Image (cartoon, rainbow, N blue to C red):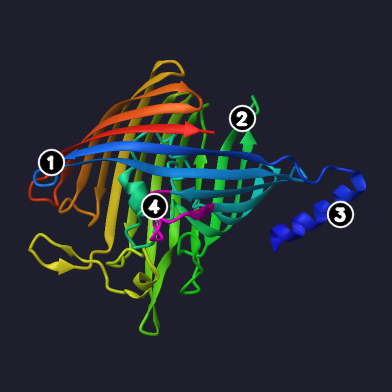
Amino acid sequence: MLIASLTLLSLLAAEGEGKAIFTKPKFSGFAMATYQATFQDGGNSNSFDVKLVRASIEGRILDDFYYKIQGQINGNTTTMGSSPRLVDYFMEWQKFDFFRVKLGQFKRPFTYENPMNPIDQGFMGYSQPVSRLAGFSDRTGMHSSNGRDIGLQFQGDFLKNGSGRNLLHYQVGVFNGQGINVKDVDERKDIIGGAWVMPIDGMRLGAFGWEGSYARKSAGRTISLRQHRYALSAEYKKGDLQLRTEYIHSTGLGFETTYQKTADGNDAAIKTYTDRNGNEVANDKADGVYALAIVPVIKNKLMAKARYDLYRPTGSSVAARTNYEVGLNYRFCKYLEVQTEYCLTHDRALEKSNYSTVFVQVSIRY
């Protein structure tokens, strides 16, 4: 309603001023193909895969309104997690740097890594804490939502220094809490927000909070699982140099079944874990931390990278999973990039905890 009102006022003003209403739409997208080999006792595997293909259209209405619609296609087309689907469709009023309004389906304002393009984040996947606690393969059992939800968000940058660079940023939004392309179930809303300071050019120091729920309907009743999350983040980025670390903590139960098809939405069994005494418990704690470095070896061409990536699904070391990753990324041009990686995983939930993965990815932008 707010966006509609602002649009109407701007349209009326534009008619009097003779402004062009629509800018020429921009079409773009990218495709990612991978090869992955895992070396694990009793479970070796290797496969080529079309990871995903995305296409988007974006543009402006009356200069002040930015819109974007983006779709995704990948491998399996039979489930909510992998079927062709819309990932973005939103409009944002951008008249003022210090106050912008976004409405539609888009990235949750939680962590630095979540909003990043899958190619630009640089590794074989988003870190485990972000994947499990920001709405990708969320621990609640939510369908894969690429870190997105449907809602309304306010954000802005302000407090410019002498060189005109903003020192503070804020963002806060109200969301359904059910992920992409799904209506609200429990009529409660998620409140998600964050803020950061930018003391020097390229550096961000921030914190995020998330209060909400994830719900399903089963046997005629609504089961709503409260979720309380926070993240602490730090980043330094200059050109191809990236240094970033984030810690994420979550309190809240999850459903046993991941929502992949309609029937899964009726499964309200709570996910349990085995504790140190061998008992099945419905643990409501999880956390994780990652730290990474991407360093240019040849400017705009070759980058070396390393990442430490820890996720604890029970908030303790009982089932902790740690990835130690190193690799090289080579950019032929801005449209073509090859990323390679070796990952050693230590998974305490497995009898034989250590195994290795080799990963190669070819990414094309268009």
Provide the major secondary structure of the magenta segment: loop
Of residues 204 and 131, the one nearer the viewer is 131
Q: Earlier in the sequence, mark 1 or mark 2?
A: 2
Q: Secondary structure at mark 4?
A: loop
- Determine the residue located farthest toward the right in the rendered image: 16
Span highlighted in magenta in the image: 74-87
Report the mark closest to the observer, 1 or 2: 1
Question: Can you see residue 355?
Answer: yes
Q: Which residue is mark 1?
A: 354
- Residue 279 picture quarter: bottom left
Report the mark closest to the observer, 4 or 2: 4
Residue type (three-letter) at the residue carrying disc 1:
Asn
Q: Earlier in the sequence, mark 4 or mark 2?
A: 4
Q: Which mark is residue 165?
A: 2
Of residues 259 and 134, the one nearer the viewer is 259
At a point 39% along the width and 48% down the height, the residue shown is: 231
Q: Which residue is mark 3?
A: 12
Q: CA distance from mark 2 to mark 3?
A: 33 Å
Q: Is residue 290 above or below residue 340?
A: below
Q: Which mark is residue 228?
A: none
Q: CA distance from mark 3 to mark 4?
A: 41 Å
Q: Which residue is mark 4?
A: 136
Q: Earlier in the sequence, mark 1 or mark 3?
A: 3
At a point 51% along the width and 45% down the height, the residue shown is: 195
Query: In the image, residue 334 lies at what x, y percent?
Result: 51, 25
Q: Please indicate whether residue 258 sits to the left or right of residue 54 in the image.
A: left
At a point 82% along the width and 56% down the height, the residue shown is: 9
